[in-house]
Structures are given as structure tokens and as C-alpha cells.
Image (cartoon, rainbow, N blue to C red):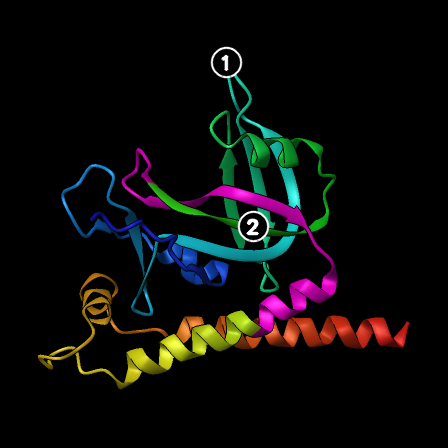
């Protein structure tokens, strides 16, 4: 009996780490097998969950609508997302939303190589919804916790050990072992959120 495919967990990740996740892979030769990006902290991601400030939307399509959205996290780093005719709900949200607005996005990571040979990472949104600041703040705290958890597991692992987690080993091979910048993005996001809250309470 064929097992029903379960939906992949949507990983919480800050934009700095997401934009560095340039390595993609499949775990089987099946055409319909999911494509994963490898996060530099050693976890695979087929879907991501992000919340931030939608700062800009633009229809960049030529023959038909193809919407680009920029979502900025508390560090000022940007997630780029693209939605067209195959993501009609997400495309209509990008058409209708008035930046700046807090949004929650669930989507699939996509990579493409530029003419210069760089790999850019973007999100193909499955859903976009407008949210409030409290939802954004909860996401920041939970994403900080998840990121620190990944950093801790990555740091504790011996990539040479036979029982090392395969994704941590892959991350060492693809990206090296410096994950300090992702710890800094956690600290920066939490400090930025606290500063916003302090300013709001002072008003």
C-alpha cells in the first residue's frame, strides 16, 4: 500500500541564513521527489515559514503577471519571493497588499544561478497572510530558538564521526564550519525587536 506523502515541516529561518542556503538536493531519483535546500546550520528545508515586513511589491512579468515581493526581517535582511499564475492566491495577495505590512509566508525555497555564476535563493509562496506585530514578534523569538538549536547541534557534532547527522556533515562540506554570522543574526533580531518595543512603550 502506498503511503500518503506528508507535507514537509516549514522551517523557521532568518533571511541571512536562508540567502546563504545555495545548495539543493533530492533524496531520490523520482521526478516528483521533493527538492531540499541545505541550511548552513545543517538542516534540510523543503518549505520555510517566515514573518517580516513586506516593503515592496512589483509585477515583473512580461506576458503575464509575475509578482515579486520583498520581505525584510528585523536585521534588515531581505527575503525575495515570486508568485505567478501557478500561485494565484499568493499573487493576488501581492497585488492587493499595500506595503509596508507585516506578512506571514509559507513557501518553497527556490535557487537559480545568475549569469555571473552566483546562486540566488528565493521563496515561491504557497500562502501569504497579513499579520500583526505580535505575530511577527512571536516568529522572531521562535526562529531565534530554532536557529540557536541548529547552531548548537552543528557545533557539538564531529563531522568526521561515523554517526554524525548526514545534513550536518553535508553543511560542513558545502559551506564550511563558520556559523557565527547566524548567531549574530539571532542576537540582532532580538535586540531590534526589543528596541522597537521600548520605543513603542516610550511613545
Q: Is residue 139 magenta?
A: yes
Image quadrant where one finds the C terminus:
bottom right
Q: Identify the residue under disc 2.
A: 105
Of the numbered discs in the image, which one, if any, rests on residue 164? none
| Disc with the residue nearer the chain's start (2 vs 1) | 1
Q: Position of residue 52 (x, y in %)?
A: 62, 56
11 in relation to 185, above or below: above
Point 74% across, 39% down: residue: 98
Q: Which secondary structure lies at badge 1?
A: loop
Contact flag, marks 2 and 1 (Cβ < 8 Å): no
Q: Residue furthest top?
A: 63
Q: Position of residue 120 (x, y in %)?
A: 38, 44
Q: Is residue 201 magenta?
A: no
Quadrant assignment, res 70? top right
Point 37% across, 77% down: residue: 151
Q: Residue furthest left?
A: 162
Q: Residue furthest bottom?
A: 156
Point 57% across, 37% down: residue: 90
- 20 displayed left or right of 55: left
Distance (Cα) linking label 2 and label 1:
26 Å
8 in relation to 94, above or below: below
Quadrant assignment, res 72? bottom right
Range shown magenta: 112-141
Q: Position of residue 64 (x, y in %)?
A: 52, 17
Tell me the mark number nearer the camera, choosing from 2 and 1.
Answer: 2
Dot 2, crowdedness within 10 Å: few (<14), some or many (≥20)? many
Q: Position of residue 145 (x, y in %)?
A: 50, 77
Which residue is at the front of the view, 160 or 116?
A: 160
Q: Identify the residue under disc 1.
A: 63
Amino acid at each position: 500500500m502506498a503511503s500518503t506523502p506528508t507535507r514537509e515541516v516549514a522551517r523557521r529561518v532568518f533571511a541571512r541564513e536562508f540567502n546563504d542556503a545555495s545548495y539543493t538536493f533530492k533524496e531520490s531519483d523520482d521526478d516528483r521527489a521533493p527538492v531540499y535546500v541545505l541550511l548552513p546550520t545543517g538542516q534540510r528545508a523543503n518549505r520555510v515559514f517566515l514573518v517580516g515586513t513586506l516593503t515592496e511589491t512589483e509585477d515583473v512579468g512580461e506576458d503575464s503577471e509575475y509578482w515579486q515581493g520583498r520581505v525584510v526581517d528585523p536585521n534588515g535582511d531581505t527575503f525575495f519571493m515570486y508568485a505567478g499564475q501557478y500561485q494565484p492566491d499568493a499573487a493576488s495577495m501581492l497585488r492587493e497588499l499595500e506595503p509596508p505590512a507585516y506578512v506571514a509566508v509559507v513557501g518553497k525555497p527556490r535557487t537559480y544561478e545568475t549569469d555571473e555564476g552566483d546562486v540566488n535563493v528565493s521563496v515561491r509562496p504557497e500562502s501569504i497572510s497579513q499579520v500583526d506585530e505580535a505575530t511577527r514578534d512571536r516568529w522572531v523569538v521562535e526562529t531565534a530558538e530554532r536557529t540557536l538549536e541548529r547552531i548548537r547541534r552543528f557545533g557539538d557534532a564531529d563531522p568526521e564521526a561515523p554517526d554524525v547527522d548526514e545534513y550536518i556533515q553535508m553543511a560542513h562540506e558545502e559551506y564550511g564550519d563558520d556559523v557565527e554570522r547566524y548567531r549574530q543574526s539571532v542576537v540582532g533580531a532580538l535586540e531590534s525587536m526589543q528596541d522597537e518595543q521600548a520605543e513603542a512603550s516610550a511613545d
